[in-house]
Image (cartoon, rainbow, N blue to C red):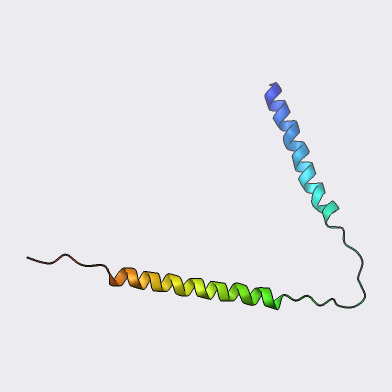
Amino acid sequence: MKRTCRLLIIGTVLLLLFNVYPQVCAAQIGDPGEDPDAPIDGGIGLLIAAGVGYGIKKANDRRKKNSTVHLPEKN
C-alpha cells in the first residue's frame, strides 16, 4: 500500500512538473521591433546535400550487391 501511494504521489508531482515547466521555459523577450534575419539556408542546404550523398551511396551499394549475386549452376 505504501509503495502504491508513493508511486501515485511521485507520478502526480512529475505530471505537475512537466505541465508547469514548459510555461516557465517559454518566457521570451518582447518584439525587438524589426524582423531579425535568421540564416537558416546554409544549414538546410548542407543537410539536403548530405541526404542526397547518403542516398546515392546506398543505391550504389545495393546495385553492387545485386550484381554480385551468383545463381547456382545447373548440372
Relative side of 49 to 66, left or right:
right
Residue drawn at point x = 70 percent, y = 30 percent: 7
Instruction: Tell me which corner region of the image, top left, top right, bottom left or bottom right, holds residue 58.
Output: bottom left
Residue drawn at point x = 45 percent, y = 72 percent: 57
Residue drawn at point x = 52 percent, y = 75 percent: 52
Q: Is residue 39 above or below residue 17?
A: below
Residue drawn at point x = 19 percent, y = 67 percent: 71
14, 70: nearer the viewer: 70
Relative side of 11 to 29, left or right:
left
Q: Is residue 27 above or below residue 9?
A: below
Image spot of residue 25 (x, y percent): 83, 54
72, 35: nearer the viewer: 72
Residue that protrudes farthest toward the left in the picture: 75
Image spot of residue 67 (x, y percent): 29, 72
Instruction: Tell me which corner region of the image, top left, top right, bottom left or bottom right, holds residue 11.
Output: top right
Instruction: Tell me which corner region of the image, top left, top right, bottom left or bottom right, holds residue 26.
Output: bottom right
Image spot of residue 5 (x, y percent): 72, 26
Q: Is residue 33 above or below residue 25?
A: below
Picture mark count: 0
- Picture quarter with the C terminus: bottom left
- Picture quarter with the N terminus: top right
